[in-house]
Amino acid sequence: MSQIHIQHGRIIDPANNIDRVGSVYIADGKIVSVTQEPAGFSPDTVIDADNQVVCPGFIDLSTRLREPGQSRKATFKSETAAAASAGVTTMCLQPDTVPVIDTAAVAELVKDLAEKSGYQQIYPIAALTRKLEGVELSSMLSLKQAGCIAVGNASQPVQNLLILRRAMEYAASHDLLLIFRPNDYWLGNKGCAHEGAFATRYGLPGIPEAAETIALSHCLELAELTGCRVHFGQISCKRAVIKIHQAKKYGLNVSADVAIHQLHLTENDIQPFDSSYHVLPPLRTDADKDALRQGLASGTLDAICSDHQPHDMDAKLGAFPETEAGISSLETLLPLMLRLVAQQKITLPQGIAALSTNPARILRLNSGALTPGFNADVCVFNPEFSWQIDADSWQSQGLNTPFWGQTMTGKVTHTLQAGKLIYCQGE
């Protein structure tokens, strides 16, 4: 394996409280040293990171890569290229693939697809229930043994609270993390927008914030009852942030993330007939957005995810409620985080921690840090670089982003995964 020297960069490693200009030394795919040159170090590759930031590679807690089963929307090849160009070195794959990740064979298939794409660090999330139907529990232990990093039911409902309780007891007995997206399916009533001013104005079926907070409350009660470790995915409203803050205050073993677009967009930004704004959970109010930002700054919300969902053109054609929900969002993850820093809502180390250190802690991975001995998952980015989202700059097969045509600030120049250079700007 080669030896790599990254020099002159501003090293930000929140896990080790490092924020200074210096060098990172890599050998045999591992971090050897930060700032201090090891004896006899002879690099094969030197990366000059002058005026750039060097940080741990990003860990994305919620992605869909559309394989297996929906390669018309995207493929592992296209989406891992997008991830690499965005500084993402580890991805958690939601279980709603086709077929569902509810057997060890499908988990193995995901690992094979990852290997063939040259992007090793894709961790499947196992289905909590068979076929995600919310009735019969999956064989979680065999799925864990097949390499699944957590269990979850994606966006699908569990039929009743007794089934959820049994699932959480099973997960707790095998020390499995439950990734739970709180949404009461029946209260949500197949809505497509926040139950508020926008939905009323355009006669759209609305999803009340109570759909999120009631499901969250149920799961918090069951987490206390069962001792299950729970991570809440894609929190979208102020009252949910308050409930998570209270749960943490009283010592419950929970964590939470927010999708990057929820920190910037609200129902007021939605263009009425533009389905690229159709997401679940829906874009909510300005007060909700402000609460999410404050929750991130205070540590109530631990992590930022992309909630990447690439779609083909057909999925986004038609009337707003008839289109499929989701944004292709890997490549806007870094610039939108930097926009929060520019707006002084969070600090740069906080933003980097929310994308690397904290997801690693939630998943119990030995990564998300530039600690000697850890895999050399490294992102080097230029925080001042300005670029436009268009067909020339975009890697994902999914073009469904409400930020299309906009100018972004902040671009990854190099991405290393386990010491292997998987992206270099301009190559």
Image (cartoon, rainbow, N blue to C red):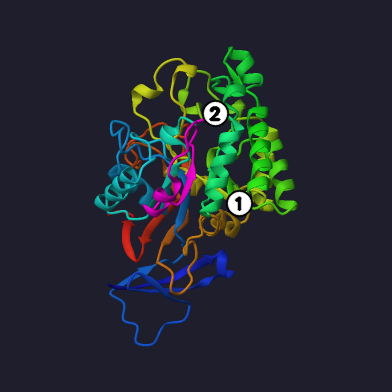
Crowd rating for badge 2 (residues with CA inside 10 Å; few <14, some 14–19, many 20+)? few
Quarter of the N terminus within the rendering: bottom left
**Residue 104, percent from left and from top:** 34, 46
Mark 2 secondary-structure assignment: loop
The three-letter amino acid code for the residue at tag 1 is Asp
Q: Which residues are magenta?
A: 135-157
Residue 171: x and y in percent read: 53, 48
State the image coordinates of residue 298 (x, y, percent, origin top left): 69, 52
Residue at 46 percent of width and 74 percent of height: 372
In this rendering, is residue 131 above or below 228?
above
Write down the residue under mark 2. Answer: 159
Q: Main secondary structure of the magenta part?
A: loop
In the rendered image, residue 85 lying in the magenta stretch gets the answer no
| Closer to the camera in the image, 276 or 340 | 276
Residue at 39% across / 50% down in the picture? 142
How many tags in the picture?
2
358 over 237 or under it: above or below:
below
Q: Amino acid at mark 2?
A: Gln
Residue 84 seen in render: yes
The answer to if 140 sits in the magenta stretch is yes
Q: Residue, x 39% and y 19% (percent of image)?
A: 317
Residue at the disc numbered 1: 302
Dot 1 crowding, Cα within 10 Å, few <14, some 14–19, many 20+ = many
Mark pair 1, 2: CA separation: 28 Å
